[in-house]
Amino acid sequence: MLDVVVAALYPLLSTGGALIAQIAVMLRIVYGAVFGAAGAVLIGTADAELFEAMWDAGLLIFGVHLVLVGVVLFRSLAAPKWIAALTAIAGFGYLVDAVVAALGAGAAASVAEFTFVGEVALLVWLIGWAGRPRRGEKAMA
């Protein structure tokens, strides 16, 4: 459900490009559906291998979503550039992990273990500062 709520960020994201923002929002909804389906597989059949494959596919989708969110935030004036950059870096971390897992390259990569900081920075910024006028800007009446 949280993924659908996060999809409500479209008005904020669209300031950096409507089409890219729409794709990012749709990917977040698809990620939520994949995550839900993976959970259902784990609960219903306890097929850990299928769950892991679905989870990795979901992380790939989530990584693309975060990269696109980083791009639209970077292109907009809505967020600081460093938040946008950290968000995109977090997305690339998930992408690397998902691709390595899909290629079956031994132990799963853990790049996102370090790059997730961008996700946390985005979350904190959204809760504390999103929608507020930035330094030097006047509040909209």
Image (spheres, rainbow, N blue to C red):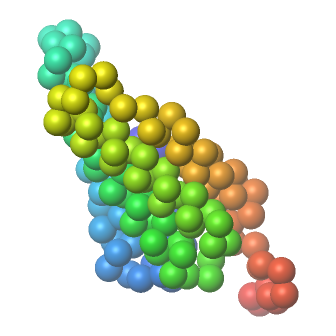
Q: In the rendered image of this protein, does residue 110 appear above or below residue 75?
A: above
Q: In the rendered image of this protein, does residue 44 appear above or below residue 137?
A: above
Q: How many marks?
A: 0
Image spot of residue 92 (x, y percent)? 40, 53
Q: Residue furthest top?
A: 46
At a point 54% along the width and 43% down the height, the residue shown is: 116
Q: Quadrant of the N terminus?
A: top left
Q: Is residue 41 visible?
A: no
At a point 57% along the width and 58% down the height, the residue shown is: 86
Image spot of residue 127 (x, y percent)? 69, 54
Image spot of residue 126 (x, y percent)? 65, 58
At a point 22% along the width and 30% down the height, the residue shown is: 105
Q: Is residue 1 left or right of residue 81?
A: left
At a point 78% along the width and 78% down the height, the residue shown is: 134
Q: Is residue 35 left or right of residue 78?
A: left
Image spot of residue 74 (x, y percent)? 54, 75
Front residue of 42 and 75 = 75
Q: Is residue 110 visible?
A: yes
Q: Is residue 59 left or right of residue 75?
A: left
Front residue of 43 and 67 = 67
Front residue of 73 and 1 = 73
Q: Quadrant of the C terminus?
A: bottom right
